[in-house]
Amino acid sequence: AGEPAAADRAALEQLVTRADAAWNSRDAAALAGLYVADGTLRVGSASATVEGAAAIRRYFTESFARVEPQMRHETTLVGLHAINEDVVLADTSVELVRVAADGSRTVVRRFATPTIAVRSGGDWRIGAARAQVIPEAKTDKPAGT
C-alpha cells in the first residue's frame, strides 16, 4: 500500500519517540504498554521470542536491571511501508549509546530493528519487534602486527 498517511506517519514517529523515552527511563511497564496484548519481541538471533505484553514487561524489567545507568536507546526511523491501513512495517535501527559524564558518546551496539506496528483501538502500537545485532565491521590489520 506504500506510504502511510501523514497523520499516521506522525503518530508512528511519536510511537518511536515514546519507546525510546520509556527505555531511557527504564520504565518496563510503559514500554510494554506500547505493545498490543499479544505482541512479540525477539532480541538477537539466539533468543526465544517473548510473547504477550506481560512477558515483554518481565523481559524489560529483567533487562533494565542489567543496563548501565549511562546507556541510552536511540532509534532511527529509516522508513515506513503501509501493508494496509492498519498495519505498517517500520524499518528502524537502534544504537545503544554510553554517555559519559563529560557528555562524550560511545556507540556500544547497533541493531537492525524491523517492527510491525498495528492500529489498535485507534492508536498505533507495536505488534512485533525484532532486534538483530549488527556486527561491527572488521578492520584488516597490516601484515606483521
Image (cartoon, helix red, strand yellow):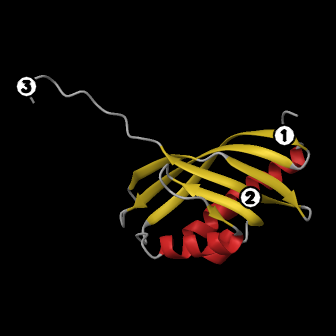
Whether residue 88 is visible here, answered yes or no, is yes
What is the secondary structure assignment of the residue under circle 2?
strand
Q: Which callout, 3 or 1, points at the residue further toward the start of the chain?
A: 1
Rate crowding at label 2 as few (under 14), some (14 to 19) or many (20 or more) other CA atoms within 10 Å: many
Does residue 127 appear left or right of residue 96 in this picture? right
User: In percent of the image, x 86 and y 56: which residue is there?
Assistant: 119
Q: Are marks 3 and 1 in contact (CB under 8 Å)?
A: no
Whether residue 25 is visible here, answered yes or no, is no
Q: Which callout, 1 or 2, points at the residue further toward the start of the chain?
A: 1
Q: Are marks 1 and 2 in contact (CB under 8 Å)?
A: no
Q: How far from the left and from the top, in percent, is residue 101?
A: 36, 67
Question: Cα distance, mark 1 to mark 2?
Answer: 14 Å
Question: Cα distance, mark 3 to mark 1?
Answer: 53 Å
Q: How far from the left and from the top, in percent, is residue 87?
A: 84, 48
Q: Which of the pair 137/73 is nearer the observer?
A: 137
List the residue tagged with mark 2: 126
Up-down: is 124 above or below 76? below
Give the quadrant of residue 36: bottom right
Q: How far from the left and from the top, in percent, is residue 76?
A: 61, 47
What's the residue type where badge 2 is placed? Ile
User: In percent of the image, x 45 and y 56: which residue is there?
Assistant: 97
Query: Nearer the viewer's eye, disc 3 or disc 1?
Result: 1
List the residue tagged with mark 3: 144
What is the secondary structure assignment of the residue under circle 1?
strand
List the residue tagged with mark 1: 83
What's the residue type where badge 3 is placed? Gly
User: In percent of the image, x 84 and y 36: which residue is there?
Assistant: 3
Give the quadrant of residue 99: bottom left
User: In percent of the image, x 56 and y 71: which residue is there?
Assistant: 60
Does residue 90 appear left or right of residue 99 in this picture? right
